[in-house]
Amino acid sequence: MFTSIVGNVFGFKALRALRLEDLRIPTAYSKTFQGPPHGIQVERDKLNKYGRPLLGCTIKPKLGLSAKNYGRACYECLRGGLDFTKDDENVNSQPFMRWRDRFVFCAEAIYKAQAETGEIKGHYLNATAGTCEEMIKRAAFARELGVPIVMHDYLTGGFTANTSLSYYCRDNGLLLHIHRAMHAVIDRQKNHGMHFRVLAKALRMSGGDHIHSGTVVGKLEGEREITLGFVDLLRDDFIEKDRSRGIFFTQDWVSMPGVIPVASGGIHVWHMPALTEIFGDDSVLQFGGGTLGHPWGNAPGAAANRVALEACVQARNEGRDLAREGNEIIKAACKWSPELAAACEVWKEIKFEFEAMDTL
């Protein structure tokens, strides 16, 4: 598809610049793809978690920890109340932490946290590798360990490799988290390249259960309406044309499973009301520094995020306006959660006041 649509034409001398904003995938073509390995509802059933966004954390520092210390950080975050922890996209198989060692210690962290909390936990184990064969070998080892989810950098790894991993994950009961590393090289410039909504549609066909989507309120690029436009293209079955949200064509996915958007990058507890209101229940809210930067440690940081999320979900279910009353909801929750109170004090001055480049 991309060979035909965005192949040689982007390199013609006669063109100064060219950008693909959107495309419509015909139903006859989309039906030739498996799509996500499992989809939103199957993931909910596997995790036995309903009625709220899922919580995650990217382990920091992203490079330099030994496998044992890395596993310990995962355990502390999961025990504190998070649903997932995550390998950063750069974490692969370096001399200080080989992939097999990391997989073993993270699996130990998952099982220990599950035993203590009674909840199903997971860690996105990065299976991205130099060859498809090595990638599948790593995914197979993750399956042998009994972990629920693996991860792939789908743009640096390539669409064909991603589709192969997606097929393996469906056949073997693994969820697949997708990182979009390198996307901004393709989609950031407004006059050349292609918009992320095109990459998102391609990913839904290639296969992935989660994909990073920006946060609207954090450090990464993303204007609200445009972000929600491609979030709908990831999650929903039928999406009407809506130019105000950057949706140029009506898209019918003919019952292809949906992909959960992951909000990650520069977010903390004060953002929780906005994130809950913007992304809704079928999302993953992923706090890296917003968890690990807690002055009392990793587990209290995770507990602070979980309390903030539960408070926002309860307030929303009671009919309160998160956009207008968000700060009051968080402050009220601080009275019975010292971990949240400490987190609020740390993050109260942290803002990312930059204009979004991705505008209509």
Image (tube, rainbow, N blue to C red):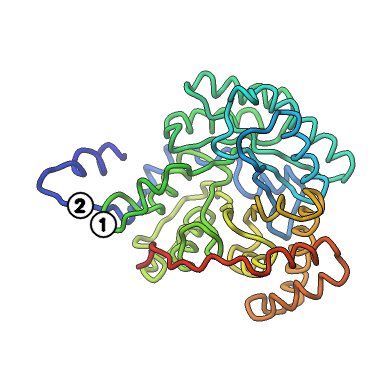
Q: Nearer the viewer, residue 334 or 145?
A: 334
Q: In the image, residue 334 lies at what x, y percent? A: 82, 70
Q: Which residue is mark 2?
A: 17
Q: What secondary structure is found at the residue carrying circle 2?
A: loop
The residue lying furthest to the left in this view is 14
Q: Label 1 sits on what residue type?
A: Asn
Residue 136 drawn at (x, y percent) = 56, 23
**Of residues 313 and 296, which is closer to you in this image?**
296
Q: Quadrant of residue 158?
A: top left
- In the rendered structure, the answer to whether residue 285 lies left or right of residue 19 reads right
On screen, residue 293 above or below 99? below
- Total labels: the figure holds 2
Residue 314 lies, with reference to residue 237, above or below; the image says: below
Where residue 339 appears, as percent x and y from the top left, is: 82, 60
Question: Residue drawn 77% across and 48% down?
Answer: 298
- Lower position in the chain sequence, tag 1 or tag 2: 2
Which residue is depicted at the point 35% across and 46% down?
186
In the picture, which quadrant includes the C terminus?
A: bottom left
For the residues marked 1 and 2, what is the alpha-carbon distance in whole angstroms? 6 Å
Which residue type carries mark 2?
Ala
Residue at which label 1 appears: 191
Position above or below: 337 against 38: below
**What SS does tag 1 mark?**
loop
10 Å neighbourhood of mark 2: few (<14), some, or many (≥20)? few
CB contact under 8 Å: marks 1 and 2: yes
